[in-house]
Amino acid sequence: MNTVKLIIVVPCYNEEEVLKETTRQLSDILALMENEGKIKEGKIIYVDDGSKDTTWTLIEQLADVNPRVMGLKLAHNVGHQQALWAGLEWVADSRYDAAVSIDADLQDDINAIPQMVDYYNKGIDTIYGVRKERKTDTFFKKHTAQLFYKLMKTMGGDIIYNHADFRLMSKRALRALISYPERNLFLRGIVPMMGYPSAAVYYDRKERFAGESKYPFTKMLNFALDGITSFSVKPLRLITAAGLVFMLASIIAIIYALSAFTSGHVFPGWTSLLISVWFIGGAILTAIGIIGEYVGKIYKEVKRRPRYFIEKEVNL
């Protein structure tokens, strides 16, 4: 008989419209795996990331009527990655053998979870849920996402193409994950770095059945910048390379200007001067911004502030 105790970690922020249906579907898939002998026990833990609606009240109500449901309420909104970390960190020190992380909107196909468990039972530590394609995305989101993955590869980031935060991790992988002390979390980059045996399960992503996305364009842009600056120093090297190019260009310009002056061919030059000043000025400000992003991350890291505080628990 299989002895695997599985828990599904679901970070939540203002998800009152989807929680009941999410709980029903996740409970059904866990019951199915128990009946098929894939797992011995299945639970769900919701991590409420400081929701402003009735999300936590619903979690408490669901926990009263459904023994599978557990909950953590964070004292303040700390962001999706930190909320997910809170759930995974709790699981790493618990009696459960493996954890599946998934968003509350269930756009990720829960029918992929039994396949993940099959891989886990074969000794695989990390199983990634990977989208087959991006049919449900808008034209803009589809192409910017593809650009992000390509850019991360170029910058040296070891991330899984078309994979978000839908994955199964073993107890060993979870304990390795929480040993990372960094506060600037980009789990899609950290997890592949650990190097444990991994596999991928492919699925079709569904439309969100209720509520609205918690990742507007500005959040996606900030998330992308976090990913790039957390896992690569190539932007800093590009600044160095650009500086060398500007120096070379300035030497050529100085030689040209001196030769023109000595030969008596003095040209007005205000247009070229204006263009060069604006161009170099913009390049300098961009470089300062990139350096500032890295300095800001160092600032956050050295303060070593707690990631989160737990305000309430239910059924733990």
Image (spheres, rainbow, N blue to C red):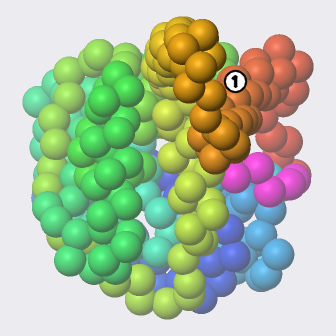
- How far across and down, in percent of the image, does residue 68 sit? 50, 63
Q: Position of residue 246 (x, y in %)?
A: 54, 19
Q: Secondary structure at mark 1?
A: helix
Q: How many marks?
A: 1
Which residue is at 64% across, 38% downward?
269
Rendered view: 143 above or below 89: below
Residue 310 included in the magenta stretch of the image: no
Instruction: Tell me where residue 88 appears, x and y as whole percent.
Output: 55, 38
Q: Nearer the viewer, residue 142 or 249?
A: 249
Is 167 left, or right, of 188 in this rendering? left
Residue at 69 percent of width and 52 percent of height: 79
The reply, left or right, for residue 271 in relation to residue 203 is right
Q: Which of these two is toward me, 64 or 79?
A: 79
Residue for badge 1: 291
Q: Quadrant of residue 301?
A: top right
Instruction: Indicate the amino acid at tag 1.
Output: Ile
Residue 194 visible in rendering? yes
Instruction: Name the spot of residue 296 as percent of width and height, x first.
Output: 78, 28
Quarter the N terminus occupies: top left
Residue occupying the point 14% across, 56% down: 202
Which one is in front, 187 or 291? 291
Read off the magenta span. 75-79
Residue 76 among those drawn in magenta: yes
205 is higher (above) or lower (below) than 82: below
Apparent side of residue 199 relative to residue 48 in the rendered image (left or right): left
Judge the density around disc 1: few (<14), some (14-19), many (≥20) Cα neighbours within 10 Å: some
147 is higher (above) or lower (below) than 304: below
